[in-house]
Image (tube, rainbow, N blue to C red):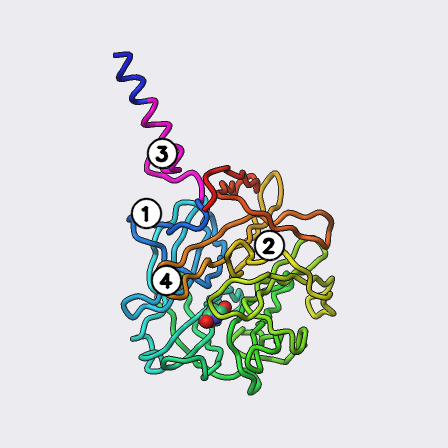
Amino acid sequence: MKNHLLLCLLILFLLSETGIAGNKASYILNGTKMVDSRGNVINAHGGGFLKQGKYYYWIGENRRNGVFVSCYRSSDLINWEFRGDLLTKNSHPQLDKANIERPKIIYNSTTRQFVMWMHYEYGGDYSFARAAVAVSPDLEKPFRFIKSFRPLGNMSRDCTLYKDTDGTAYFFSSARENYDMIQYELTDDYLDIRTQIATLWPGGHREAPALFKRGNYYFIITSGCTGWAPNQAKYAFSTKITGPWSDLKDIGDKTTYKSQPTFVLPLDGNKTFSYIYVGDRWDGENYYNSTYVFLPLVFVNDSTPVLKWAPAISPNPKSGKIKLKNIIDK
Ligand code: DGJ
């Protein structure tokens, strides 16, 4: 009897150490393949997050079996449920041989449409250098692909979307063979470019932009341009979304903990606000071995974020607190 009890306790301990006690994970183990509630690998690289009601949605690159963009949802940010494929090669004739990267979605409360912007390529290389737009009234259902184009004639590769508190939306993308990062304001329906706001750090060679706001400060985190290989991420801040932005400063270590930024996820909890850096740990040789990195961004003062490594994290969206788990370094 005593032995049985000890065995049960041992099994419970082992399950909690792997984070899957009670069939539910209790933390995100960084640099590993995350799986959804069906046990399938989560395909959502270069992705973005969106909170709708009690769920967080994670939308990103799939790249398997003719699927470009897939959608997952979670109420705890740890256990994810697959909800559907949003764009596939059958969604539009322009997608039959496309390569879609870094899809991001925001909601337009006037048109009641979810609007997706992404990096669009056709064929095997990166020479098209276009943005593309798709819409859907339902975040979990297939999107309608509207168009691909070069914003105001500019090349457009790595990109992100940012919806400000007043509802104005902005698109940031790497232009001029990735030499420049251009910031555009979108039209009210979010389907087009209204104007070019600025060319950020001309000649600075930045990609993988991720925007967020904390207090009175806007932040943009970007990577350098080294293909699939990780490099030192940098951040800039501004008190206005339209700039001027500060100079770029290093964040994280020399390889951003072997990751490239894709999004900063704000947790608006009842105890505190916190911010999770989400990056892709690419395996360029074998894209499908790529993994994810979720790390807390902490602030030493209003304009200085710090990114430290943690092998695993346990976010609590209700309180806004993030626990760090000290598990073997990956
Ligand atoms: C870096 C980009 O950030 C990725 O999205 C992808 O385009 C790779 N380059 C391709 O080399």
Residue contact at pointers 3 and 1, CB within 8 angstroms: no
Taking the image as shown, residue 135 lies to the left or right of residue 181, namely left
Point out the tag, 2 or 3, that comes first from the N-terminus: 3
- How many numbered discs? 4
Identify the residue position indicated by label 2 in the image: 253
Tell me if mark 4 has few (under 14), some (14-19) or many (20+) residues whose alpha carbon lies within 10 angstroms of its own.
many
Would the CB of label 1 be found within 8 Å of ligand 1?
no
Tell me if mark 1 has few (under 14), some (14-19) or many (20+) residues whose alpha carbon lies within 10 angstroms of its own.
some
Q: Which amino acid does label 3 sit on?
A: Ala
Q: Where is residue 13 in the image (x, y as percent from the top left)?
A: 37, 27
Identify the residue position indicated by label 3 in the image: 21
Point out the tag, 3 or 1, that comes first from the N-terminus: 3
Taking the image as shown, residue 47 lies to the left or right of residue 272, namely left
Q: Which residue is drawn at 40% across and 52% down?
A: 73
Tell me if mark 2 has few (under 14), some (14-19) or many (20+) residues whose alpha carbon lies within 10 angstroms of its own.
some
Question: How far apart, in angstroms, are the residues tagged by discs 2 and 4?
Answer: 30 Å
Identify the residue position indicated by label 1 in the image: 37
Q: What residue type is labelled 4?
A: Ser
Q: Which span of residues is magenta-colored?
A: 9-28
